[in-house]
Amino acid sequence: MTDLPEPLQQLIDDFAFVDRAERAELLIEMADRFGEVPGRIATRPFPEDHYVTRCESQAYVWAEDLPDGTQKYHFAVENPQGLSAKAWAVILGESLSGQPLEKVVQVPGDVVFSIFGKDVSMGKGEGMLGMLGLLQHFARKSLASRSNANA
Amino acid sequence: MTSTAQISTRGYANPDVLVSTDWVAQHLNDPSVRIIESNEDQLLYPSGHIPGAVQVDWAADLNDQLRRDYLDREHFEQLMSRIGVGNDTTVVFYGDKNNWWATYAFWVFQLFGHKNAKVMDGGRLKWEKEGREMTREVPKYTATQYRASERDDSTIRAFRDQVLKHQAAGKTLVDVRSPQEYSGERTHMPEYPQEGVLRGGHIPGARNVPWARAANPEDGTFKSAEELRAIYEQEQGLKQDDDVIAYCRIGERSSHTWFVLTHLLGYENVRNYDGSWTEWGNSVGLPIER
């Protein structure tokens, strides 16, 4: 089992014993908390290289480098019906921001299914994996530039 | 504009199968009507729905929980009883994404021969865009005594071996997936537990008509019969008396195309291959074209 960032592990534990209705309720509460990327990070039109190509809800991801070497993650979701994408953005933002990048890049894709359940449809699962993948791409880039600077 | 044209003026073979958002708004308290929401996104219904609407979920309600198959007659009767539908109730489906899961639920209901079934044109998107009322309140209805026929798998459903014969005979196949899935460049995503496929491509001879082309993207309504004929007939060469099998990945998008060909264009011989690519692309020895 990969050593997950602690807040993410806690969330997965919270979701382990919920039934379908409770899962939906928890995720809707999260989606309600969604806050879009602040204007100091990005404004519309959002740049293409932050666009999640596999997400049907037109999601964007940004990583803001923090002084302690970690990152804070920001999101935009353009589809007003993209509730799952918004909930997932809140989960990723709250549970991976400020976590060691070495752990962030190792988060396996199957956490999507631990949280959203096994019967997430292909399109939705793919979009959410795409959001995680782009976030991890930014984390990897930051790690690489750090190791180059140390070389 | 065609998308806002009255349903009755769009030239459909069976215009009564569609109802407008206005019609639904006028029948919210009609005891002979049950509004049913079916979505891909499981969070949508609990986050707000048409007042009085019940949810029918493809994974929890329409599938057998053990085998890959649909529910049987007994479970269908239980479902109908639970959502307060009697044999004479008019059910009206609506949902997200151009009604794709709504038409899937509609199709499954037809396996059991529920006669009074309709789809709300434009689905959830149109209802929301029109600023109509939504609620989070989940209604409770008095349980009914519903008597269903045995599931009929022979008329509108196709199985793998039938598709193989159909293909060998050169009959019409419509692959309603994206061009990337059709070409085989995209197969499945890694780590995906349910719908992975081993081989990419399509059933030899299948034409590629992505399902959503039948809908107007701005409000999810169905295109007019004339526009639909331009796609399926002028462009793809289908004919109304063709023996047609439609497929996608798991059979949900192709039920949308089944609905369009059968009810809007009046094709009499259309089946949905629900095994679709997740069965075909994983089966040993079946022909594939790229």
Image: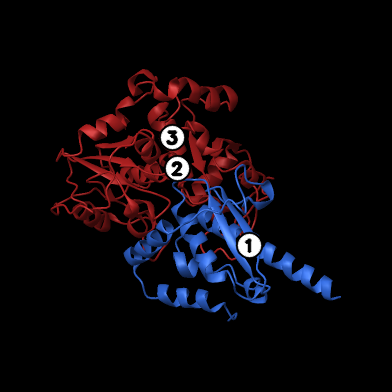
Chain colours: A blue, B red
Q: Secondary structure at mark 2?
A: helix
**Crowding near the residue tagged with mark 1, few <14, some 14–19, many ≥20 C-alpha atoms within 10 Å:** many
The numbered disc on residue A135 is: 1
Residue A58 in view in this figure: yes
Task: Say which chain tag 1 marks.
Answer: A
Residue count near mark 2 (Cα–Cα under 10 Å), binned few <14, some 14–19, many ≥20? many
Tell which circle, 3 or 2, labels the residue nearer the N-terminal end.
2
Seen in the image, is A128 located left or right of residue B153?
right
- Point 41% across, 36% down: residue: B259
Give residue B30's position: percent from left, percent from top: 16, 38
Occupied quadrant, residue B95 = top left
In space, the residues marked 2 and 1 are separated at their CA atoms by: 26 Å
Q: Tell me the CA gap for discs 3 and 2.
A: 7 Å
| Residue A75 vs residue B101, the one in the foreground | A75
State the image coordinates of residue B161 (x, y, percent, origin top left): 51, 50
Asked if B174 appears above or below B9 in the picture, the reply is: below
The residue drawn where x is 44% and y is 31% is B261
Residue to which mark 2 is pinned: B97
Q: Which mark is residue B220?
A: 3
Q: Nearer the viewer, residue B213 or B247?
A: B213
Q: Nearer the viewer, mark 2 or mark 1?
A: 1
